Amino acid sequence: MVSKKFLRWKKVFGKVESERMPTRKIWDHAIDLKEIFKPQKERIYPLSKNKREEVQSFINNQLRNVMRAPKRKRFPMHLNT
């Protein structure tokens, strides 16, 4: 049951919508990291075995969805100023 004040966003959080990639927007861009950056591998929150398996399953499902997403050609974008 969803409160009436949140009904207009119900579609955004539906199962089908959560399993597809969002459409590209003009403000999407790459994040360029500095060459000296070294990612640190740390576990922020200790999780139980069941929770770790649940998180891993979620990640695998999301990765499968990304792999199924249609490939697009990249074109330069021109913004009218």
Image (cartoon, helix red, strand yellow):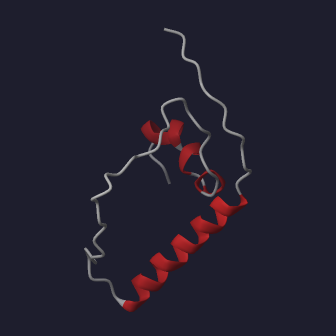
Q: Is residue 39 left or right of residue 70?
A: left
| Depth order, front residue of 57/17 | 57
| Depth order, front residue of 64/2 | 64
Relative height, residue 21 to residue 47 (above, below): above
Q: What residue is drawn where x is 62% and y is 58%?
A: 19
Q: What residue is drawn where x is 28% and y is 60%?
A: 37
Residue 36 in the image: state x and y as whole percent.
27, 59
Residue furthest toward the top? Answer: 81
Q: Is residue 32 left or right of residue 29?
A: left
Residue 60 in the image: state x and y as whole percent.
57, 74
Q: What residue is drawn where x is 30% and y is 75%?
A: 41
Residue furthest toward the front? Answer: 35
Relative height, residue 72 to residue 39 (above, below): above
Residue 31 in the image: state x and y as whole percent.
40, 46
Q: What residue is drawn where x is 45% and y is 76%?
A: 55
Quadrant of residue 40 in the image?
bottom left
